[in-house]
Amino acid sequence: MSPNWECRMNKRDSEIMEELRGKIRELTEEDRRLHKKLEEKESKINELQEENNKQKEEINELKEENQKLRQTIFGLKTSKKRRRSSNANQKPKKRGPPFGHKGTSRKRPDRVDTTIVLELEECPYCGGELKELEDVRVRYEEEIIPVPLYVIKYIIKQGYCKHCDKVVYPEVPETIGNRHFGVRFLLYIAYLRYVMNLPEGKIATLLNDTYNAHVSVGTVVDYLKKAAELFGDEYKRIKCEMRESHICNYDDTGQRVDRRNRWLWAFVSKEAVLYLTSKNRGKKVVIKVLGEDYDGVSGQDFYPSFDGAPGRKQKCWSHLIVPARENIERKHPPPESLEFYEGLLQIFEDAKEAVKGLETEEERSRVYAEFVDRLEKFVTQEGKWKHHGVKKLAKRALKYRHELFTFILVPGVDPTNNVAERALRPGVRQRKIWGCFRTKKGAKNRDIMMSVMGTMKIQNKDFFAHGKEYILSKLS
């Protein structure tokens, strides 16, 4: 082999080797680019997964909030299946009384209507003679005795007046027009309807089965209408009294009237309760009831429309503390939720304790300013509250910080709106049992009777005694 040939072969091999090295460098560079793209894609996928998880959490939180709103407006509850699944990890509560609880029994009656002596003449086992012992056993039994209708027959004697040239006769007492049943019957029907929350058909069944009254549903409805008519002036008086109240708590709940969505309002003062059915939920109803120039204190929740309502305001602490506690009870609670809840609760407890020792207005104003400043500093800590659920409550507390401590300035003001919430409970129970009102008049009659009965309850008056006295005064 010639030297030239070998030289050409070596040159050719070096060119091939250089070409291969170039391809290797290109492939290496492409592999590096592909790895970089893959890392970018994986990073993007991780970001999308994190964002997806956050969105799922937000969706679950929105579902919970939506369920709470539905329950607030329409009284709907979560299903038993969901409640069981949410409480699956919680330990079941121990049955029975707590450790150390002392048992109690029914007290011995103060009155005995009938005494029966029981004595054996011979042994019930062998028929032998018995020797009487000094010790005796005493047992009390309370029984319900069926009471039939009490029928009164009036013999009305007439007389002729020569001066007036008229036949005159005495008026029948305790009678409602030409109706067959008396005042107590009317009050009892109203009690069954608006306190025991019985449907009209059940009331008729109860009266027929218990008293053999032979009444129809139409009779029950007629007496309920008459009761609302008789107490109509008392309802107007309660309205006027509510305007003069210095402290008034109010709240509302949804209901159906004549196939439309309506709102049942409850206004509660120290001396009266007023129920009102309205198609509005905003401050217009408050102005209608309390007046534009109302200068008292009103307890309310955080519904935005209430911000423009008249008078000084006390925002409900329960509507701030309960959502904070619910953040802790979530399946995946925010990291800062426990600290926020405990700090908020501590401020509330300290404020309630501080009120007890205040006497002068100067002391109240000073303590009020201290707690407003304390709450503001707590909820505005830089970078402390990051989760949107906690941040939302912090913003709410900051916005209404001055109206959360009105109970320090004004004696007798409740820091929560529980009194109005409790006043609405009978309406919620009625909605669950009755369903709705078919007419506006039916809802109006309910408002009148529940206002009158609720006001009597607050004033510790017996509905049957004072209700009868009021009706007789109206009939006279």
Image: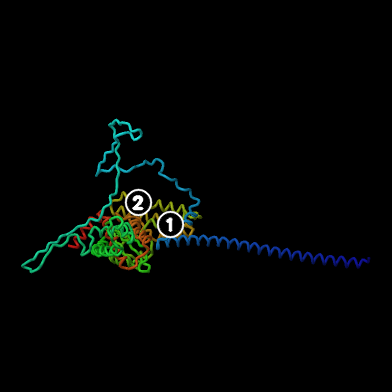
Q: Badge 2 local density, few (<14 within 10 Å), some, or many (20+)?
A: some
Q: Residue under circle 2? A: 352
Q: Residue under circle 1? A: 323
Q: Secondary structure at mark 1?
A: helix
Q: Secondary structure at mark 2?
A: helix
143, 80: nearer the viewer? 143
Q: Which of the 4 image quadrants contains residue 279?
A: bottom left
Left or right: 254, with 147 as reference point: right
Left or right: 404, with 272 as reference point: right
For badge 2, the amino acid type reads: Lys
Left or right: 40, with 122 as reference point: right
For badge 1, the amino acid type reads: Pro
Q: As drawn, which residue projects farthest toward the right?
A: 1
310, 67: nearer the viewer? 67
Q: Which mark is residue 459?
A: none
Q: Badge 1 local density, few (<14 within 10 Å), some, or many (20+)?
A: some
